[in-house]
Image (cartoon, rainbow, N blue to C red):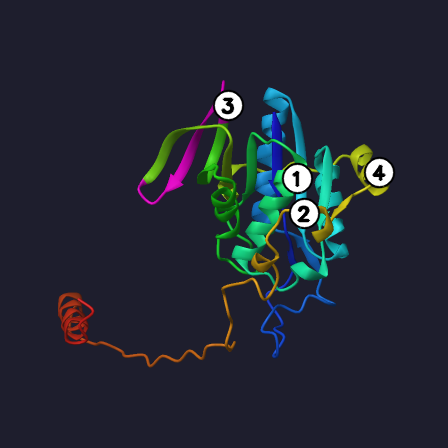
């Protein structure tokens, strides 16, 4: 079984800095970590490998510093890792990123399962992984809690608003994992040492000759950020009084009805 896990290096802070000219994230000088939901996706892939055999390949798109999270993935048990990096990919939005990742996955060969986190904690869109499935023409199952393989199909439990949904899908399939999916394993000392010595090949634009460059980078991104700002929040509190709880409740309901909230 060939399992591909998409991981992302994200800022380890809530104080995100924005380039005022490009309206993109400034990552220089900001501590980075592996996106937590992607770590759940990696654990799902490693569990599939433990149970059914096969190979786990991790990929990440970003600058050279993103190799740090790829080495972390290798230390957790992934078999190989690739960094997708090129100046032409810079500034890609979720659409462009998903297209580039899909092209890289096709270059790596056939796959059975692609995994990713439900969203990244920096952008919070939850769009990239499902969009990869669209580019590849694969089935997608989002918000999975666990995944089992039965022949040429998978059986997944999904978290939905109404509860838990059990669904079957044929291979190949793309799935996104949630925090509730599992508890990511710790890296072993042996794997950590091996990951420091491991070669992490880079996939650049030159390695994707059949790709459409108009779907890459800042110019190939349909999302355009016109401005960024920190929203200002203010609230005026109102104290509702009365002789007893029933009177206070009636007064509250009346106020909510007048405000057309009820």
- Mark positioned earlier in the residue sequence (2 or 1): 1
Q: Are marks 3 and 1 in contact (CB under 8 Å)?
A: no
Q: Is residue 10 visible?
A: yes
**View extreme (top): residue:** 151
SS assignment at label 3: strand
Mark number for residue 208?
Answer: 2
Q: CA distance from mark 3 to mark 2?
A: 31 Å
Q: Please say whether residue 196 is one of the residues in the magenta stretch.
A: no
Q: Please say whether residue 158 is one of the residues in the magenta stretch.
A: yes
Q: Nearer the viewer, mark 3 or mark 1?
A: 1
x and y, in percent, of residue 146 in the image: 49, 32
Q: Nearer the viewer, mark 1 or mark 4?
A: 1
Q: CA distance from mark 2 to mark 1?
A: 7 Å
Q: Which residues are magenta?
A: 148-162
SS assignment at label 2: loop
Q: Residue at x 67, y 37 (%)?
A: 108
Q: Residue at x 34, y 39 (%)?
A: 163
Mark number for residue 107?
Answer: 1
> Looking at the image, which is closer to me, 79 or 235?
79
x and y, in percent, of residue 72 in the image: 73, 44
- Mark positioned earlier in the residue sequence (3 or 4): 3
């Amino acid at each position: 079984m060939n399992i591909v896990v998409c991981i992302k290096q994200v800022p380890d802070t809530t104080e995100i800095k924005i380039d005022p000219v490009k309206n993109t994230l400034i990552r220089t000088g900001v501590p980075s970590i592996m996106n937590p939901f992607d770590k759940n996706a990696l654990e799902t892939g490693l569990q599939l490998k433990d149970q059914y055999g096969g190979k786990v390949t991790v990929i990440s798109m970003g600058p050279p510093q993103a190799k740090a999270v790829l080495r972390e993935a290798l230390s957790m048990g992934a078999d190989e890792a690739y960094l997708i990096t090129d100046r032409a990919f810079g500034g890609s939005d979720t659409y462009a990123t998903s297209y580039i990742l899909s092209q890289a996955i096709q270059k790596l060969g056939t796959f059975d399962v692609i995994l990713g986190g439900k969203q990244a904690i920096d952008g919070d869109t939850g769009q990239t992984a499902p969009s990869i499935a669209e580019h590849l023409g694969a089935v997608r199952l989002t918000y999975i809690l666990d995944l089992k393989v039965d022949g040429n199909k998978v059986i997944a439990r999904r978290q939905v608003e109404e509860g838990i949904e059990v669904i079957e899908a044929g291979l190949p399939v793309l799935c996104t994992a949630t925090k509730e999916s599992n508890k990511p394993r710790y890296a072993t000392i042996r794997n950590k040492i091996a990951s420091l010595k491991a070669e992490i090949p880079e996939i650049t634009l030159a390695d994707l000759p059949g790709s459409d460059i108009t779907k890459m980078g800042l110019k190939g991104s349909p999302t355009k950020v016109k401005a960024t700002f920190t929203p200002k929040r203010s609230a005026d509190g109102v104290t509702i009084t009365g002789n007893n709880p029933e009177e206070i409740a009636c007064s509250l309901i009346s106020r909510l009805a007048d405000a057309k909230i009820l």
